Amino acid sequence: MKFQERPDCYLDIKTGLEWSKENFGPMSWDEAMKQFDDSDGWRLPTIDELLTLVDHDGYKPATELPGMVSSYYWSSTTHADYTNYAWLVYFSNGYDNHDYKFFHYYVRAVRGGKEK
């Protein structure tokens, strides 16, 4: 098992990242960035961090992280060429994509690691 359950999170044994037990949202990217601003240790994951959750052998959801919904999840990573877009992962199949920041998707907060 890749994840170890702790009282308030799931620890990813491979990366050392701690993931919230709850899904949040759906909400816009701006709402997610404000809610998880790292002031209490929780933040929105980068696209690279979010992609560490993907299990391409899985489907609906394509992850072993308990409680994930087969839907889109925001990352904190803004698209380099189109700043009104941010990167996200579709956990039905594990593929990444980008979309307008005003759309509403799920969030899974993370703490630890190094934000890029």
Image: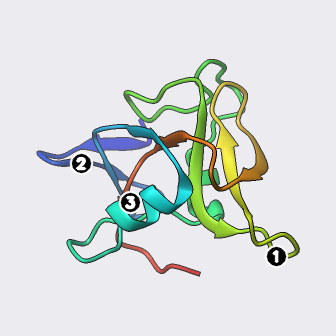
- Please provide percent x and percent y for residue 61: 58, 23
Residue at 66% x, 19% y: name it: 59
Q: Report the amino acid beneath label 1.
A: Ala
The residue that disc 1 covers is: 80
Q: Mark 2, residues whose alpha carbon is within 10 Å: few (<14), some, or many (≥20)?
A: some
CA separation in Å, label 1 and label 3 = 22 Å
Residue at 76% x, 46% y: name it: 96
* Camera-side mark, 1 or 2: 1
| C-beta proximity under 8 Å, tags 1 and 3 | no
Image mark for residue 17 = none
Image mark for residue 110 = 3
Mark nearer the N terminus (3 vs 2)? 2
Mark nearer the N terminus (1 vs 2)? 2
The residue that disc 2 covers is: 9
Q: Report the amino acid beneath label 3.
A: Val
Q: Against 36, is 97 above or below?
A: above
- Please provide percent x and percent y for residue 9: 24, 48
Q: Report the amino acid beneath label 2.
A: Cys
Q: Against 114, is 73 above or below?
A: above
